[in-house]
Structures are given as C-alpha cells and as structure tokens.
Amino acid sequence: MFRSLYHQGFARVAACTLPVALANPAINAQRILESASASAADGTVLCVFPELGLCGYTLEDLLQQEALLAETRKVLLSLAQASAALCPVLVVGAPLLWKNALYNCAVVIHSGKILGVVPKSYIPNYREFYEARHFRPGADIRGQTIEIDGHTVPFGVDLLFEAEDVPSFCLSVEICEDMWVPIPPSAHAALAGATIIANLSASDITVGKAETRNMLCQSLSARNIAAYLYTAAGEGESTTDLAWDGQTAIFENGSLLAASERFPSGTTTVIADVDLTLLRQERLRMGSFADAAHQENTEIWRRIRFTLVPPSANLGLKRPLSRFPFVPAAPERLAQDCFEAFTIQVSALKQRLKTSGVKTMVIGISGGLDSTHALLVAVRAADELGWPRSAVRGYTMPGFGTTDKTLTSANALMAQLNITHETLDIRPAAELMLLTMRHPYADGQPVHDITFENVQAGLRTDFLFRLANQHHGIVIGTGDLSELALGWCTYGVGDQMAHYNVNAGLPKTLIQHLIRWCIASGHFATAVGKVLTDVLATEISPELIPVGENGPQSTESIIGPYALHDFALFYILRYGFSPSRVAFLAEQAWQDASTGQWPPGFPASEQKSYDLPTIRHWLEIFVRRFFATSQFKRSAMPNGPKVMPGGNLSPRGDWRAPSDGNARLWLDDLKQNVPEA
C-alpha cells in the first residue's frame, strides 16, 4: 500500500479530446468508451470529455432536431450501461431538454448510472458565438431533477460529486464560457468543497487564444486551490467559419501538470496525478479561504456520493516532481528565482543598515558556500548604498580543522572584492580556553568532541561581535535555512547568532545556484568569478576537527545529504506532509538518476539516486533533529528576510513551534508506514 498513489492521497485523472462524428451520438459514444477504457487501464478515476462531445458542438440548428435529441438521450443511457465495469467517473457533454427548453449539459456517469447533470451557466452570444439561439442559461437551476428516458437524476448547477473511498475527491463541473465570466461557478463550488473542477469546452481557436485559456485555467486553479481539468473540442468539428484545436490541460493550485500538444490529431488524452492531500493542506493553511467559504451558503449544494474502488497497485506517479523543490530545473525560471532571491537579500540588508545607523558590516569568511554568498550580498548592498567596499570587514579565522584550500579561497575572494580583510587565528585563544576548562585536548589527548568544536565556533562569533563594537558595525550572519532546520549550528555565542542573517531564508541546495548566477550577473569582476568557481567545488564542511586520514570533516557524511534534507524540509514546512508521505515522494523523485531534469549547472558527478532504505534512514535523522532537538535554536534566531515561497523558520513568521516539543508522532509515522526496503 505504501507505493499506491491513492493510498498516498493522489488521484489519477484524464482530460480527453477525440475526433467527433457530427450528429452521430452512437459513434461518439463508442469513441468515448474506448478512450475511457484505455484511461481506466492506466489507473484513472476521472475522464473528462469536450463540450457537446456526444453529438458535436458545431451542429447549429440541428441541435433542435427531435431525431438528434432523442438519439442523444438513448445513447447516454447506453453509454452509462456500457461503462458500468469501468472505474473512472465519465463527464460527457450533451444537449438535453428540460421544461421545454434546451440546455448545454455535462453528464456525470459512474458504475452504469448517470449520477447527475450540470447545465451550462452562461451562454455566450457575442462575436462568433450564437448559443442563445439554441440554449437557455442554467445559472439559476438548483435543486431540480431531469428525466432521461424514464430515469430521474439530479439536475442543476448545485451538484458536487464526492467519492466516499478517496478522501478529498470532490468534483464540480462547469462548461466553457463559465470560466470566462468574472465570477465563475467553480469559485462557489471550490468554497463549498470541490477540489477537482472539470471544464468541458468547445472554444474555437484564434491566434493567441490558447495562451489566454492557459492563463485562465492556471489562475482558477490557484485562486480556488483546486485541480482544474480543461478539454476542448477539436478534430471533426465543422470548419465552416471557425477552427478547433482540441486543447487539453490539467492544472493544480496554479501549476501545469500535463498538457496536450497543439492541434492534436486523433484521440488525445493527458493524464496526471492530482495531489488531493496538498490541496486540503493548502486550504487548511490559508485561513482566508475558510473565511471566504464562511460568507457562502454552502448548505445549498447537493452532494452526490459514490464509491470509486481505485486500484491499489503501484502505478508510479504521473506528475512533475522535482528532486530539488526549492530549485527550478528550467534555466529561465532558475535565473529569475536567483535574481529575485539575491535582490530580496540585498534590499533587506540595505534597509537594516539604513535604519541601524552603523558604519560597517562585519562578517566571518570561511571559504565555504554560505559565508561566500553572504559576503556577495553585503558587498552588493554596500555598492547600492554608495558605501565604500572597505566598509565591509571580512575576517578569516583559521581553527584546528581549517584547510589550505578554504583559507586560500577566503583570502583571495576578499582581496578581489576590495573589502577590508584580516586574518584572526583563533587557535591560541581556543587552546587557552581548553586549558582553562581542563579539556583532555589540552593534555595532548586527541579528543575532538562537541566541546572542542564549539569552543572554536563560539570564539569566532565572540570575536565578530566585539569587532562589530570596535568598528561601529553589525555582524552579518551566514547560516542558511537548511542548517536551521537541522539545528546544525552552535547556539548563542556561535554561528546561530548574528545582528542580521541574510541567509536565514535560503536552503542549502539553492545557494550554489545563486553563486553561479552571481558569477554570470556582471555585478562582480571576472577575477571574483574565478574564486567563486573554486568555492563551488569545495565540499561542505565545518572544518572544526583536524584533517585526518579520510580528509577534511564532511558535514553530509555526518548529518546526511542536504538534497534529501531540503526535500523533506520543503514538504513538511510548506504543506505539513507526514514523514511517510515525504518518503513516498522522495522515492519517486530520487530512485532513478537518469530520469527527470537536473538543475542547470548541477555537476554530473553529483547526480545521484537514493533508494528507499537510504531515504528512510536520513529522513529519520531529519525528523528527530527538526522536531525534537533544534527548535530552541530557531526560537531565538536573529532577524533575516524570508526569501522562498516554501517558507522560512522564523518564530515570528512561517514556523512557530514549542522549543520543548518532541518528535514521537512523526517518528512513529515513519517507522510504522514506511517499509525498510
């Protein structure tokens, strides 16, 4: 069950377009059935077809012919009966008579029955559209029923279709023009609980219209915090005066999950797994969504309940899933994100400098990623404020584990940036402190425990604060979001503390890309870029323990890969997912290094895969550190800007948690629900 997408809160859905046979409901029903059967074999639970797809949209006055209407009603029942053995809900378009008027309808079918019929709310009658000649608007139809060849079924725009055995599967339907009006019916449906919105469309194609449709669908899915399935009529529709492109797409909460090619030929189906748990969690967090729902009379909606019995097998996952949720894989988007992140940091720091009245910035430079990037932010802030770069005071503070490589990089970077830079060797002070404390190291014993490490980390921070006093400045923090999540920092008089931390909102996995962007940005000289390239090739290390036989101290060999930790952080912080669900997603994202996109510039040597036991092991460490042992450090963290939409860990912002909490529930979930292999 662990690897079942339905067990994990997803639902596989399909948006289908197919060649229509004008005025031939029987042929169209057969094609719909064939398409639905193929989708069912792929594990779907919902198939949506175009507007008036049972007979064709471009029939004009033929829509009012009794022969066509009678055949449509008859074929509808036949289609329902023929699809009885299929799992998916089918949503098909058909013209239906009700109280002596014709309505453009979406018919919802499942398990051999018609569950309900939803009329089109808004009838376009402008420019090329002339629907009012044939159809009545259904916007005010609620609480009604319709007879279809002796079968009475619910009829109206107040229908929600809820699956009792798939949590949060709640379907609403609208038709074409309904999404183009200022307040679409789907807005009310979402507030009433709909998580999946199906739009059956005809919509002729003109230059630029496909982009407009995408924009509307994307916006509706974001505003409604819902999945939005759009399928338009295409091949087979009359081209007397118009053309048709058969556009199909599936959106979720503002993101495109799947889309057809332009102007597809033949039957075309796009399939995606929509994340019902994500939608539920997002609505839970966005209190204004519930406030808006409170203003609605949601009791007027009729809820049609049914049982889906979805497949429980391992079907994989059909949706974009990034290995690095904080880092987009598309080059243009990554460049834009890096520009915004860097500019957010610089602008936030400038504001703090202007209001604090200080004259300098003091920063410790190790030659690693975090301090390097913080220094670039500080220098850029000084440039934009018109300060001399000498106002940025950088200090290398070699300790017992400092390597020549990082020390050389740090000094070269500061020299090329033309800041004030000095070397302050902390080893004599550390040795004196260890001697005063009667630590075994002072007696010549090779004891490199946490005290040994934190004496160095504490001295560095102590010196920086006193230097800031001396030079009328503030200490610029360098620790990042990932380190804060893991508690991988020394509390109080240590790297956890600063006057202002520009990196507090940046995950470790993004920082290397930010540095690459800085190299290409033109903000810094070519010689600076060469040093930055060397920094990018340096292994992540606190360098607090003397170099041994296995080389310098390695952070990731101790606490695990930041790639996996940032993956877990994103989904736990942003959406509140359980550890077992994070493990499921991580396996899908990381099990095969040869599939999916890697971010631009990501070294080929680092393109790794992780199996489930490895994911489970490091996730347990993340959960224990995040929930049980490190919140007290975040509760006292200094100011710094939120940067990423995935959230930050400020106790004044996105993450407010007790410092004396525990990880029992999360560890139990991981141990009980994630297999060891």
Image (tube, rainbow, N blue to C red):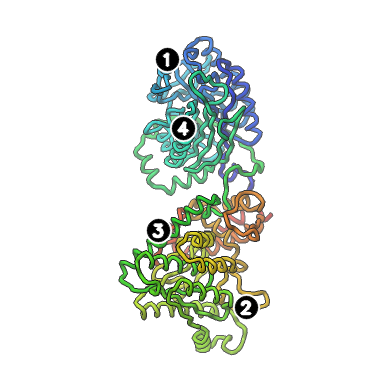
Circle nearer the viewer, 4 or 3: 4
Q: Distance of mark 3 from mark 1, alpha carbons?
A: 55 Å
Q: Amino acid at mark 3?
A: Gly
Label 1, label 2: how many angstroms apart (C-alpha)? 85 Å
- First in residue order: circle 4 vs circle 1: 1
Q: Earlier in the sequence, mark 1 or mark 2?
A: 1
**Location of mark 1 (residue):** 101
Asked if the residue under mark 2 is in contact with the one under mark 1, i.e. CB atoms within 8 Å, the reply is: no
**Residue 184 in view here:** yes
Q: Amino acid at mark 4?
A: Lys
For image coordinates 37% across by 45% down, the residue present is: 288
Secondary structure under badge 1? strand
Answer with mark 4 or mark 3, whichever residue precedes in sequence.
4
Q: Which mark is residue 209?
A: 4
Q: Is residue 644 above or below residue 195?
A: below
Q: CA distance from mark 4 to mark 2?
A: 63 Å
Q: Which mark is residue 401?
A: none
Q: Residues within 10 Å of mark 2 (few under 14, many from 20)?
A: some
Q: Where does label 2 land, which residue?
A: 547
Q: Residues within 10 Å of mark 3 (few under 14, many from 20)?
A: few
